[in-house]
Amino acid sequence: MKQILLIEDNIMNSELVKDILEMENYEITCTADGMDALDILEKESFDLILTDINLPKMDGLELVKHIRSDMDPNIKVIAISSDTLTKDGRQFTDVGFDGFIQKPFKIGEFRKYIKSLLDD
């Protein structure tokens, strides 16, 4: 079973994403901030990390820098953001993310995208 770490501080968004991914038979670990995510990553390994950008204690941008420099530089890390200024996610890939999901997203497209990331 594929393991996904979800970092999302909005409980409704977290529950929605978790429910969608569990329906696809992925195992989901959730946390609400970047510092807790680093602690989890020191103890467990994941096939994919999905992280919001605006998080308490450590934002997603700082988190991906730590993952790339101090942990597994090859793990897929996807930014999830409702930032309306983001057009194509290029600023996220420029700092180390493997991709970008704009919130709100269409459930079918989200499921298909996650499946494509984990099935390669």
Image: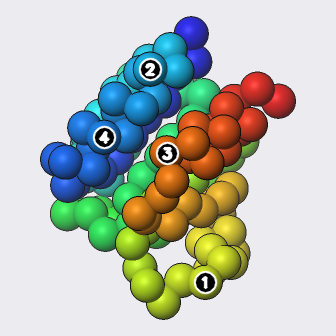
Measured as percent of width and height from the top left, residue 5 is found at 43, 34
The first of marks 1 and 4 along the sequence is 4
- Count of number-bearing discs: 4
Seen at 20% across and 63% down, the residue is: 56
Tell me the residue that label 3 is attached to: 107
The first of marks 2 and 4 along the sequence is 4
Give the SS element for disc 2.
Answer: helix
- Dot 1 crowding, Cα within 10 Å, few <14, some 14–19, many 20+: few
Q: Are marks 4 and 3 in contact (CB under 8 Å)?
A: no
Q: Nearer the viewer, residue 58 or 105?
A: 105
Mark on residue 23? Answer: 2
The amino acid type of the residue labelled 4 equals Leu
Mark on residue 87? Answer: 1
Query: Marks 1 and 4, Cα distance to the nearest angstrom?
Result: 23 Å
**Residue 65 appears left or right of 113:** left
Tell me the residue that label 4 is attached to: 16
User: Which quarter of the figure is the N terminus placed in?
Assistant: top right
